[in-house]
Image: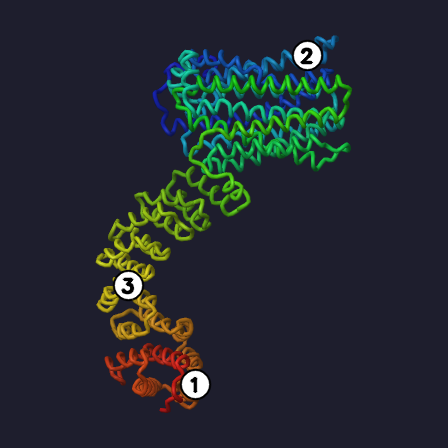
């Protein structure tokens, strides 16, 4: 508290740095979070809709109340005074002082119920509201530039959305308490109490603002002459179009939301606490909007979101243009939710677009003119069109809801024009509206973007890797760019986690190129994972780099390249792969080589696999792997696996299962009985030898090569079982002669 008071009243003696460190930026963001959390309380107790109800309760006419709602926009020209203060005392202190004086002005309104003259009551409320809006306008010239100071391009959208989320949540809680209170005590002193409390919280919040760090760039920007600042804004096409689009966005919700509250109160005549319930729904819409925008805005871009939210505001206007005579809480609540969702989406989108397109050296002057211009546009539209039309319809003799029905019918035309203006914004790096709408109804992609946000906010390598694995497990295409970005990580675990995620999604040519670069890292890196993915995804243009991998001394990389080349059907490399397999001593190359041979779909390759299985130096698990691969060539891999699974635990159970699978095609029932004896290997060898001598098909020839190589009496048990199952299956498919007797 003392630190904040010192920053507010004394300022910084050490001046402003030329650049903020990442730690200073993080500290600044924390101060923003604290401020917006507290600001939600003070705003709830001095909410625009609350002031509308307070004004109506004190006898202010609906037409003047509508004008009151436009002060927040009409006072925007006073931002010029804020610019002058920024040049003298800095952006943070300017904002803090203006916020402090804002709540001083709000105190004036507490005196209204004690005045005897309606003219004085109206005057005090209007003056207090005007001052409340005036100092806000002077202060917010510093808000957006300060937000730019403490953020980067990667976290800007989520930061802005997070601020609105915090303010909306605390505002919603505070407003809920207020609604409950007004439901029990519907007296004017309740309004006075909450306004006073809101002012006290606002005073404290201003001391937090004063502590936000900034560079000297903002002061230099504020010192630019008005003519130069305007020229810089106007000459650049992006910022010039933003000037009009910002105004269009402000006009869009200014001509809709305040008049919805007036319509629900004056049109349907419901009690104040019930009317405030719809402010609660409006805030809830803002909370949902902030949550969603915090997840997606940094990825999809602000422009399409602005177009969507401005266009969707047509739905609430359409409802009120043809509002039913009877009060229906569900549809009324729905349109307030939609309006709140769109309002905060527009605010976040405009701020993000501004910070993405305007240089930091131009931000103070540019935001000044943009806010002044948009404020005047929204204020005049709200007061002249809003207040003017309502007065006109009242003068014409319309009453109740009819006034607001005709008003919103006219507003529909205004909104269509505003959508057109927003659509003229120049494109940034962004998604199409169609893709965004598809995203909003796809939970998996939304969750992927949520994990992406967490990933970018985790500097800790362990947490980063965990989030990366989670992102990869989702299997959403929206995560491709972030996963690809992590291929540049210096850490093996990060790169491998990223590639495991990429293998689950359809990848672009850019990612294919990145994987080929990763493949060229060579021995004892994560290149083997890249080879595996390039093969699985059939990336034909990777063949050159995969062939180079065949000569690698890294058994992981060499083995994966063998399989990948067969997957992409690079027939020119098949002979080299077969020779590598035959000569291989490393167990991993043996396993991957066998798998590569299986993928060639050539039955004659059963021979080299079975011959390799005769190598007594092979570990038992490797032997099981390659025998299963050999049986896979004729489609009995799953059955041989079942045999191995049982046999390795219980020899007799495994044999029993295997002999059942031989099913009499190659062996007569009495032959099967004989095989079940302990001396079965000699009987099995004779049966196999007799069979391959009597047949000349490719599988029989392959098995004969193995038997000739080892001799009938020296064949190991597991390879013999494998050959028996292979011949049995193949004999069924090729209509063999009657079964061989032993």
Relative vertical location of residue 337 with respect to residue 560 in this rendering, above or below: above
- The residue under the point 70% across, 37% down is 330
Q: Is residue 538 left or right of residue 194?
A: left
Closer-to-camera residue (533/681): 533
Q: Which residue is mark 3?
A: 571
Q: How is the image coloured?
A: rainbow
Does residue 349 appear in this view?
Answer: yes
**Coordinates of residue 303 in the picture (x, y in percent):** 48, 32
Relative vertical location of residue 662 with respect to residue 58 in this rendering, above or below: below
Q: Which badge, 3 or 1, comes first in the chain's sequence?
A: 3
Q: Is residue 696 left or right of residue 736?
A: left
Depth check, mark 3 against mark 2: the one in front is 3
**Coordinates of residue 228 in the picture (x, y in percent):** 40, 13
Q: Which badge, 3 or 2, comes first in the chain's sequence?
A: 2
Mark 2: secondary structure:
helix
Closer-to-camera residue (494/264): 264
**Coordinates of residue 123 in the picture (x, y in percent):** 67, 10
Q: Which residue is mark 1?
A: 664
Q: Residues within 10 Å of mark 2 (few under 14, many from 20)?
A: few
Q: Residues within 10 Å of mark 3 (few under 14, many from 20)?
A: few
Depth check, mark 2 against mark 1: the one in front is 1
Relative vertical location of residue 609 with respect to residue 308 in this rendering, above or below: below
Q: Is residue 102 left or right of residue 367?
A: right
Closer-to-camera residue (143/406): 406
Q: Which residue is mark 2?
A: 111
Corner quadrant of residue 700: bottom left
Mark 3: secondary structure:
helix
Q: Which badge, 2 or 1, comes first in the chain's sequence?
A: 2
């Amino acid at each position: 508290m003392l630190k904040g008071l010192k920053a507010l009243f004394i300022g910084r003696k050490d001046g402003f740095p030329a650049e903020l460190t990442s730690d200073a930026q993080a500290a600044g963001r924390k101060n923003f979070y604290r401020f917006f959390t507290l600001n939600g309380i003070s705003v709830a107790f001095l909410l625009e809709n609350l002031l509308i109800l307070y004004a109506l309760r004190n006898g202010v006419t609906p037409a003047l109340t509508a004008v009151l709602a436009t002060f927040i926009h009409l006072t925007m020209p006073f931002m010029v005074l804020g610019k002058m203060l920024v040049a003298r005392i800095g952006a943070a202190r300017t904002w803090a002082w203006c916020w402090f004086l804002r709540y001083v002005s709000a105190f004036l309104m507490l005196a209204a119920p004690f005045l005897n003259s309606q003219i004085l009551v109206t005057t005090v409320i209007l003056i207090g509201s005007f001052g409340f809006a005036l100092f806000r306008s002077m202060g917010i010239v510093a808000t957006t530039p300060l937000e730019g100071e403490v953020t980067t391009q990667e976290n800007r959208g989520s930061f802005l959305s997070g601020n609105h989320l915090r303010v909306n949540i605390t505002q919603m809680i505070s407003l809920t308490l207020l609604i409950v209170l007004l439901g029990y005590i519907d007296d004017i002193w309740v309004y006075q109490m909450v306004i006073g409390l809101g002012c006290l919280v606002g005073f404290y919040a201003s001391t937090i603002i004063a502590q936000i760090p900034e560079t000297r760039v903002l002061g230099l920007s504020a010192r630019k002459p008005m003519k130069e600042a305007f020229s810089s804004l106007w000459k650049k096409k992006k910022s010039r179009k933003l000037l009009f689009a910002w105004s269009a966005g402000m006009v869009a919700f200014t001509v809709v939301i305040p008049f919805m509250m007036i319509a629900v109160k004056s049109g349907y005549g419901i009690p104040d606490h019930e009317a405030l319930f719809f402010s609660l729904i409006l805030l809830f819409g803002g909370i949902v909007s902030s949550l969603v925008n915090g997840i997606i805005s940094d990825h999809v871009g602000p422009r399409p979101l602005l177009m969507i939210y401005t266009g969707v505001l047509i739905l609430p206007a359409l409802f009120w243009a043809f509002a039913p005579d009877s009060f229906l809480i569900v549809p009324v609540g729905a349109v307030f939710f939609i309006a709140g969702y769109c309002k905060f989406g527009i605010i976040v989108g405009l701020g993000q677009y501004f910070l993405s397109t305007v240089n930091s050296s131009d931000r103070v002057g540019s935001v000044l003119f943009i806010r002044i211009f948009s404020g005047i546009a929204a204020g005049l539209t709200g007061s002249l069109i809003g207040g003017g039309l309502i007065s006109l319809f009242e003068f014409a003799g319309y009453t109740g809801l009819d006034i607001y029905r005709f008003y919103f019918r006219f507003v529909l035309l205004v909104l269509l024009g505003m959508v057109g203006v927003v659509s003229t914004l120049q494109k940034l790096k962004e998604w199409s509206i169609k893709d965004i709408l598809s995203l909003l109804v796809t939970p998996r992609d939304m969750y992927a973007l949520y994990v992406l946000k967490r990933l970018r906010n985790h500097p800790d390598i362990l947490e980063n890797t965990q989030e990366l694995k989670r992102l990869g497990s989702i299997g959403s295409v929206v995560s491709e760019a972030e996963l690809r970005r992590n291929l540049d990580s210096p850490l093996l675990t990060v790169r491998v986690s990223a590639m495991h995620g990429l293998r689950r999604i359809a990848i672009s040519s850019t990612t294919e190129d990145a994987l080929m670069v990763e493949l060229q890292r060579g021995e004892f890196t994560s290149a083997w994972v890249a080879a595996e993915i390039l093969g699985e995804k059939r990336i034909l243009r990777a063949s050159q780099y995969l062939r180079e991998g065949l000569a690698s001394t890294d058994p992981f990389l060499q083995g994966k390249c063998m399989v990948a080349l067969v997957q992409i059907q690079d027939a020119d490399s098949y002979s080299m792969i077969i020779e590598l397999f035959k000569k291989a001593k490393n167990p991993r190359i043996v396993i991957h080589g066998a798998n590569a041979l299986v993928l060639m779909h050539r039955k004659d390759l059963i021979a080299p696999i079975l011959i390799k299985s005769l190598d007594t130096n092979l570990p038992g698990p490797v032997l099981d792997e390659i025998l299963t691969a050999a049986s896979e060539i004729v489609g009995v891999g799953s059955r041989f696996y079942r045999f191995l699974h049982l046999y390795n635990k219980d020899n007799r159970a495994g044999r029993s299962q295997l002999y059942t699978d031989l099913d009499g095609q190659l062996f007569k029932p009495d032959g099967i009985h004989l095989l079940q004896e302990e001396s079965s290997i000699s009987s099995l060898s004779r049966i196999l030898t007799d069979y391959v001598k009597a047949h000349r098909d490719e599988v029989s020839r392959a098995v004969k090569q193995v038997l000739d190589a080892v001799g009938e009496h020296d064949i190991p048990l597991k390879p013999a079982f494998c050959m028996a199952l292979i011949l049995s299956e193949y004999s069924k498919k090729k209509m063999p002669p009657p079964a061989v007797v032993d």
